[in-house]
Image (tube, rainbow, N blue to C red):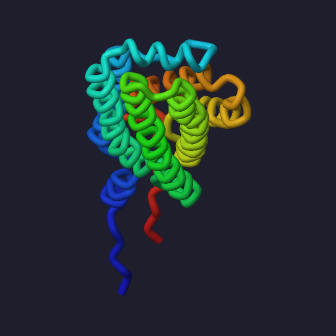
Amino acid sequence: MAQATVPAPFAGRATESTTTTSAAPWRWAGGFGLAHIVVMLGAFSLEGVATDSSTWSGTAKMFAGHSFNQTFYASYVEAMAFVFLVPALVILARQLGRGTETGRVAGQTALGLGIAYVGATIAIGFPPLTTSVYAAQHGADSNVVASIDLLRNYGFILQVALSMAFTVALGVAALAGRRFTRWGGYAGIAIGAGGLVVTPFVHNGMNMVQMIWWVGLCVLCLMGGPKDRPKQAPTDQAI
């Protein structure tokens, strides 16, 4: 007796469902990612503190003349902005990592590096800055105030380096899964790999470049997902 086979139209639909993903997760990732940027930049503008003095006494004087409450609350909101980044990274790691083992490993690597980035940012942002301002306004020596602030400045270099590392990993995942291959893949790898090399010298510039890349990736996600999804696998033919 001949073995019954699944008609080709049904087999084709089953295959297609495994390669076509819903637009909703991409849009959630894009929304969370952009919310992170908007809240972070908004809080940073309210924070109003930037170390632009070339002397330690000048740094202490600047902090002494700034509102502690303004710095405290704005810095807290800035730190909480990174809460939005976590679900964006989780979703992107899953979506970009689908389909290949290389993509899954790269996606999980990006997620791990992204979590490390969030932890490093919160650790070297809010505590040293608010402590420096408080100490300056309560009679601490200028050398002590400036030294505490240096933790924030040098920690920022590590923060940018971690952002470059997870950008490379997301780029590899995008290429492996053939999703957002140009902007997410090639551009992500180029920016991240180049940034890892030059960050110690131009960390502010590379931070801005990576932020532009991230915003572009989030906008693409909000548009409903990649247009270059993997092609449908050929339908098995009945013998």
Position of 23 with respect to 50 (left or right) is left
Q: Is residue 27 above or below residue 21?
A: above
The percent position of residue 122, horizontal first and vertical second, equals 41, 40
The percent position of residue 165, horizontal first and vertical second, equals 60, 42
Residue occupying the far bottom of the picture: 1
Q: Is residue 181 above or below residue 106?
A: above
The percent position of residue 185, horizontal first and vertical second, equals 58, 36
Nearer to us in this view, 69 or 118:
69
Q: How many marks?
A: 0
Can residue 222 be seen here?
no
Can residue 155 be seen here?
yes
Give the image quarter of residue 75. top left
Quarter of the picture containing the N terminus is bottom left
Residue at image location 55% in from the left, 13% down from the top: 58
Residue at image location 56% in from the left, 32% down from the top: 147
The percent position of residue 186, horizontal first and vertical second, equals 63, 33
Q: Is residue 76 above or below residue 204?
A: below
Nearer to us in this view, 51 or 231:
51
Residue at image location 57% in from the left, 41% down from the top: 162
Residue at image location 32% in from the left, 33% down from the top: 81
Nearer to us in this view, 190 or 1:
190
